[in-house]
Amino acid sequence: MKTLLKSVSMAALGFAMLGTAGTASAETLTIVSWGGAYTKSQVEAYHKPWIAKTGDTINSEDYNGGLAEVRAQVEAGNVTWDLVDFELSDAVRGCDEGILEILPINELPAGDDGTPAVEDFISGTLHECSVGEIVWSTVYAYDTTKLSSAPTTIADFFNLQDFPGKRGMRKTPKANLEMALMADGVPADEVYETLSTQAGVERAFAKLDTIKDETIWWEAGAQPPQLLADGEVVMTTAYNGRLFNAIVTEGKPFEIVWDGQVWDIDLWAIPKGAPNKDRAWEFIKFATDTTRLADQSNYISYGPVRKSSFAKVTPEMQPHMPTAPDNFKNPLQNDFEFWADYGDELNERFNAWLAS
Amino acid sequence: MVDAAAPSSAPTASSTRDLVTADGTPLKVALARATRLSKLRAFLLVAPLLLFILVSFIFPIVQMLWRSIDNPEVTDAIPRTAALLEDWNGEDLPSEQVYAALIEEISADGMRQEIGRMGARLNYEDGGFRSLINKTQRGAGEISESPIQYAMIGFDEAWEKQDTWAELDALAESPGFAAAFPATAEKLRAWETGNSPFAEKTPGADVYETLFEELSGSGNSTDIAQVVSLLGGTDNPIADLIQRTAANAAEIKDRPLRFALGGVDKDWNDTATWKVIKAVSPPVTMSYYLNALDRTYDANGNIVMQPEWKQIYVDLFLKTIYVSLGVTLCCIVLAYPIAHLLAILPAKHSNLLLILVLLPFWTSLLVRTTSWIVLLQSQGVVNDVLFFLGIVTDESRLQLIYNMTGTVIAMTHILLPFMVLPLYSVMKTISPSYLRAARSLGANPLVAFVRVYVPQTVPGIGAGSILVFILAIGYYITPALVGGQDGQLISNFIAYHMQRSLNWGMAAALGTVLLAGVLAMYWLYDRLVGIDNMKLG
């Protein structure tokens, strides 16, 4: 099936090249994303159909998140990236600092059921400089062969008595502090309120203290499934797409616990002064329509941000989506405003805590 | 070139006795000309390299040094406010003028980028500033349209509530209210007719202004008392609101913008907020350096220690130095015998060994680091072997990675060739006859080795140590991958500030402190060992 798809798209590509050869319309877009299975899903769902449609060439580059490269390019006046896949907090911050293009959001196509784009995108996924793409989630998973009883709640992650063994967590306060508070009994909708007080921060760190000595800290998204597979940890937080990959594609004996998931979105944005910014905007409009967004979920278990795309997600993929009803019982949306304000401070504190 | 001809035109008494060339130019001058030409030629030869070094090395370093003190964000965004704040005494809230300047500058068109940067800069000092600045930017435009309205809302947010105005509007029909506040009653009736049941929650600015005018008018205490009793006495929150607004009317009228900004966010009525802005205003700052040394300015501009939970950098610098020294020491201990062996073996064996030393040197850094992960992890090769030999049990497997042990092991391995090669090149030149002479003069092998051989290898140890130490002190990838929580070094934090927090000033300050540290070490080395004693081969 995959080879068939590949050859079809190659043929389509060749066809498109023939069709547009000699015309000025074919351009080269440099599209930057997070690499691995995630970029692969974008290549399948967006790049290939776009190439078939326009005959453009697409340079797919990887990066590790953050605004550093874009800021350096914009400040040096030498922007080479046309389109970047950002985390929400970075997209908002880049917009505030004026290093991202402001986008004519109202030009986005309506959903295929006719709902205008502004209503079709779930709330909080359209911004001045960025257009939402997928919903992803930080969850925790455990190795079913290593634990005698199955953990079911976020509190179990912090329960060393009943579920002994090493834990894995991302080396950042983001999502960890939230999970610690939820495990300590703070309802999801009060988490950020609690965290903005000194006492709340103390409480979250005190909860993290209980597993600090048993925790291994990871940084890249590919690490936690590896840590689990190597037996370095018995449970670890991870991005749900990476876990899906390990469980379904590689057949690893892991189980995801969705309780207390912290979900977030990824968005497209265009660096200020990008060489092909008009074309990049055309690409965004194309890639975020109902069909394309739904199609991406065939390749990785991240949910589409358009309501009209939900129904088009295939039944096999439905249960793996962070937004599937069974998984979405006790979710927390990552609050970018909170992290934009307190991220630096909490990071410093987190690092000091780690080193102590 | 210009002055080359000059001396010949003015021969002095002494120069006439000097040697001259065939064309009569004094030999000295001719020589000087010739050497100058060759010097120029030599300079032109090195010019491309010099230019390359200037552009790619010196310039970035100077730029980094500059970034660590450069502080233009606030003056770029709100120059007038910053200038006015300079004269502020820091005790009471700033004058109304400052508020006016801030409102005007923060809501100015086309300044969004500058304002955003200022928010980010202020946020480094105190979390929460970014949203404060963003919020104020959105709210400030409205304030300048109708200061009194927003001052009232700022005084008490009940003035923004639909309930308040619904109740006042209902009251507007009563003759008592119309008698007390005739103009307001009329405005409210006009608002009501134009506004079928509360499509707008609150009336326009003119209603606010009229009501405020009547509340603050002189000799109106009886009118206010009447309205209060109409509302059912001070137990009614709206009556209380009216009474309090009237009592503070003079102050509100005097400083509408202070109240209005306070309504956007109460932080604007806190001197601490203004103190931070004032402290960050100067175009050049030491605060990045202070931060890099765990110090900060307090509200009055004195240098004090950071709160305890923020003190990380000094410890990290020390840790980085200790780790680098430790790695250097490990490298010496491991490399010395290897280099010695290489130097004394016949060439056909030593070449093979040398390739074994160089092979990892040619392998990617990442590959080598990840191989160590495979070897050292708790289910890894080393632990499996120890388990097999019965040295550890399954529960007591050694934690060899994701901590300081892992960092030191992996860094030592990666930096080892930098120690082996200089040592080898020095040892290669030491003639074996020295040792033989020492032995023949009665020294036992150990004494001969320690007192004759080792001193001659000091230049190699010095060169290798400096290489390894300086590379180690800036190491970044390896600690990031195998360091876990306590194996992080200062360069990881520089990277963090470059890539994540985008606090490039802080990254530059940390980098500069590190550079200064390395130079200090270099100086110390020069004093203790002497840099001339160093031999790289």
Image (spheres, coloured by chain):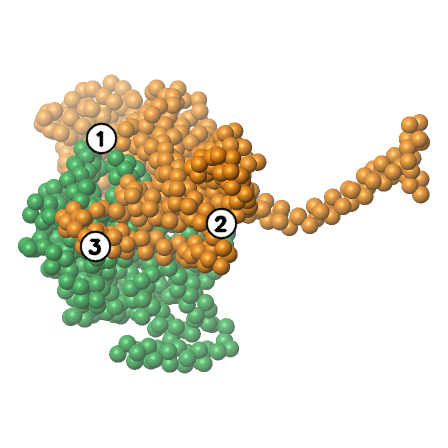
Mark 3 residue crowding within 10 angstroms, few (<14) / some (14–19) / many (20+): some
Residue type for callout 3: Asp
User: Residue B478, image x and y in percent?
Assistant: 36, 48
Residue under the image location 29 percent in, 28 percent down: B307
Mark 2 lies on a secondary structure that is helix
Disc assigned to residue B384: 3
- The answer to whether residue A304 is above or below residue B219 is below
Residue type for callout 2: Ala
Q: Are the residues flagged by discs 1 and 3 from a single subunit? A: yes
Residue B321 in sight from this viewpoint: yes
Q: Are the residues flagged by discs 1 and 2 from a single subunit? A: yes
Residue A240 in sight from this viewpoint: no
Mark 1 lies on a secondary structure that is loop
> Mark 1 near mark 3, Cβ–Cβ under 8 Å?
no
Q: Which chain is orange?
A: B
Which quarter of the figure has residue B11? Answer: top right
Q: Which residue is mark 2?
A: B343
> Mark 3 near mark 2, Cβ–Cβ under 8 Å?
no
Q: Image check: B344 left or right of A170?
A: right
User: Residue B437, image x and y in percent?
Assistant: 53, 39
User: Residue B451, image x and y in percent?
Assistant: 48, 34
Q: Are the residues flagged by discs 3 and 2 from a single subunit? A: yes
Disc assigned to residue B156: 1
Mark found first going from the N terminus, 3 or 2: 2
Mark found first going from the N terminus, 1 or 2: 1
Residue under the image location 51 percent in, 77 percent down: A22
What chain does badge 1 belong to? Answer: B
Mark 2 residue crowding within 10 angstroms, few (<14) / some (14–19) / many (20+): many
Disc nearest the viewer among 1 and 3: 3
Residue type for callout 1: Asp
Residue under the image location 34 percent in, 65 percent down: A285
Q: Which chain is green?
A: A
